[in-house]
Image: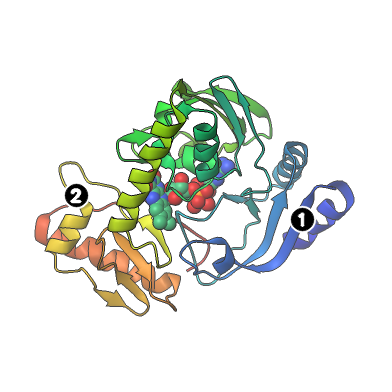
Amino acid sequence: MYPAKIAEFIDHNLQATRYFLNEDMKKHTTFKTGGPADILIMAYTIEDLQKLISFILKEKIPYIVIGHGSNLIVGDKGIREPVIKLEKNLSKCTVTGEVIEAEAGALLTDVAKLAQKHALTGLEFACGIPGTIGGAVFMNAGAYGGEIKDVLEEVLVLTRDGKLKVRGVRELNLGYRTSIMQKNGDLIVKAKFRFQKGEQEAIQKKMDDLTRRREENQPLDFPSAGSIFKRPAGHYTGQLIQEANLKGYKIGGAQVSLKHAGFIINTGNATSSEIVKLIRHIQAEVKKRFNVQLETEVKMIGEF
Ligand SMILES: Cc1cc2nc3c(=O)[nH]c(=O)nc-3n(C[C@H](O)[C@H](O)[C@H](O)COP(=O)(O)OP(=O)(O)OC[C@H]3O[C@@H](n4cnc5c(N)ncnc54)[C@H](O)[C@@H]3O)c2cc1C
């Protein structure tokens, strides 16, 4: 069984890595749903991460990388592949002039605060996005007219053949919630951002304004994964769902938010299966009424 094999490898070879067997994924997703991962691994250095990935690749074991779990639905039956979690453990950041380099597990909100502290403007849009740098680059996260693409210069990745490689932003095919990493399976290790010099006070004001707008419009009191669907060309997702009379519609503990119809919330005891059933229902209703196919933004992993 590979969890035992990986655990043995870590015990004997990696000093700066921890692992958890049969780990409840509810603790690692903002939806707070999902079954157990057979093994969840946290590497604390890039060296350990590279050794771990080389071992896993040599053994031909498929693996999954996660950050903050804020764009994920994990199946209720859990995850058989090893899950490598980078949030916080791999999160060093350095500031040099107008450049910030951040490891993939750093929180986007912390990097936005760091930029503000150094009077660097360009990342204000991200101050309320609850993901990691790795997840944000993978998704080309964006909000209020800004996206990661605008400020990213390059990334350090671990390729599917276990090599560390620097890729410039143009190589990443960053588009609306998409990147080349979604196709080639590169693991994002570190990102380098370039900002403009600004004024601390003005940057803080912009961040405060955007935070207020989020608090007013989004159901932040409930577990969710943010917008469930991508915005279809020429439409607003929330409006389509609302006009399909689905605001507040519930399946088990999963509900279309009354505050923002583009969000599904966990009202307390939802399962991932209920969330997925609700997604399928919304897609079918919106297709039937408006002939628009809603595509999910959220990623699904594990067994349902
Ligand atoms: C309340 C709320 C508000 C949100 N608002 C926004 C918003 O305004 N704009 C927006 O774009 N998103 C938003 N989101 C969604 C989410 O925060 C972003 O997509 C975020 O970038 C995901 O980062 P993460 O670390 O949580 O990634 P995860 O959810 O952990 O993973 C998402 C995907 O990225 C992959 N991944 C993660 N880390 C790496 C890595 N290091 N290397 C390779 N692949 C990796 C995973 O395999 C997975 O496929 C919101 C979510 C919530 C809960």
Q: Residue at x 21, y 68 (%)?
A: 247
Which residue does the image show at 31% across and 77% down from the upper left?
Answer: 251
| Residue 17 drawn at (x, y percent) | 78, 50
286 lies left or right of 40: left
Residue where numbered disc 2 is placed: 236
Residue drawn at point x = 38 percent, y = 39 percent: 205
Q: Residues within 10 Å of mark 1 (few under 14, many from 20)?
A: some
Give the amino acid type for the residue marked by disc 2 in the picture.
Tyr
Q: Which residue is mark 1?
A: 18
Relative to 210, is 284 above or below?
A: below
Does residue 262 lie above or below 236 as drawn? below
Mark 1, ligand 1, within 8 Å: the answer is no
Q: Earlier in the sequence, mark 1 or mark 2?
A: 1
> Is residue 296 visible in this depiction of the protein?
no
Q: Position of residue 117 (x, y in %)?
A: 54, 34
Q: CA distance from mark 1 to mark 2?
A: 43 Å
Amino acid type of the residue tagged 1 in the rendering: Arg
SS of the residue under disc 2: loop
